[in-house]
Amino acid sequence: MDPQNLPLRLAEVRARIARAAARAGRSADSVTLLAVGKGHPPAQLAAALEAGVTHLGESYLEEGLEKIAALRERPVTWHFVGRLQANKTRPIAAAFDWVHGLERLKIAERLAAQRPAGLPPLNVCLQVNLGGEASKAGVAPAALAPLAAAVAALPNLALRGLMCLPPPETDPARQRAWFARLRGLRDGLAAGGVRLDTLSMGMSEDFESAVLEGSTLVRLGTVLFGPRPVQ
């Protein structure tokens, strides 16, 4: 898509977020828009920044590092939203502000140990595999509480919330049911003393349903930038 069209698409998306938030009795400001630029060139991300986006997400480490370097003069909060591999935790810990796909204590310990001195704690969200899908990462709901307690105790990390990639649904009611389940897991952790302020849920196909169920951060790519270019 032409970067010049991005401000209009962004305005439309923000209006949709605002309407969903209003239906839920919330302020639109309670929802952070994370623009996910996977597969799109730095020029597209620069256009998003010019249009008022402040949070950018990447799924692939090498691509993300290139874009961080290309946009290093811009004020950006960078999120890593891809699958975490043990051999790539050091550059992630050094370059990103947020990590959304944390599912194992071993990875959390590596990120904590490798976060450079002088940087603020790395914000992390635990990914929950709500549907038990073998093709997707994430901790099982039954194993979430002990993992959350262990990660919350680590230095150099700030456990902020939960993230999910639920099974794809076209029916808004079914979409909402998955997101309500993640919200319930967050509330259960709070009852056990682990209080979180972030629900990273909702993507281009279902973000309005996510906002209705309490999402505080939506991860949007296609609805802003169009389909990823064919490699």
Image (cartoon, rainbow, N blue to C red):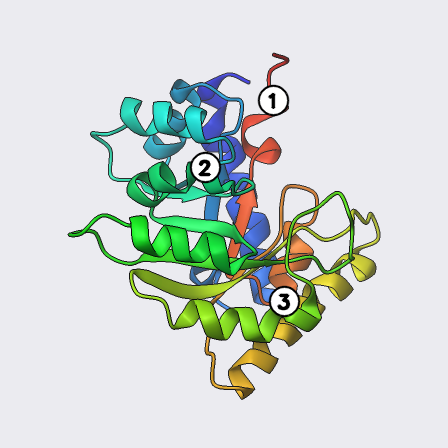
Q: Calculate the distance from the C-alpha at mark 1 to the C-alpha at mark 3.
A: 31 Å
Position of the C terminus by quadrant: top right
Which one is in front in this view, the residue at disc 1 or the one at disc 2?
Answer: 2
Is residue 67 placed above or below 170 in the rendered structure? above
Q: How many marks?
A: 3
Q: Is residue 221 visible?
A: yes
Q: Depth check: 88 or 222 in front?
A: 88
In this rendering, the label closer to the viewer, 1 or 3: 1
Percent across and percent down for residue 203 are: 62, 45
Q: Which residue is mark 1?
A: 228
Name the spot of residue 36 as percent of width and height, x first: 50, 36
Q: Decide: marks 1, 2 in contact (CB < 8 A)?
A: no
Placement of 27 over or under 114, stated as above or below? below
Secondary structure type for disc 3: helix
Q: Residue at x 31, y 39 (%)?
A: 95
- Taking the spot 54% from the left edge, 45% from the top edge, the residue there is 219
Kindly report the distance in space between the C-alpha atoms of the residues bearing marks 3 and 2. 44 Å
Of residues 58 and 8, the one drawn nearer to the viewer in this rendering: 58
Q: Which residue is mark 2?
A: 87
Residue 20 is left or right of residue 113, and the answer is right
Instruction: Give neighbour class at mark 3: few <14, some 14-19, many 20+ (Cα, 10 Å).
Output: few
Between residues 184 and 93, which one lies in front from this camera angle?
Answer: 93
State yes or no: discs 1 and 3 in contact (Cβ < 8 Å): no
Q: What is the number of the mark on residue 23?
A: 3
In this picture, residue 202 sits left or right of residue 7: right
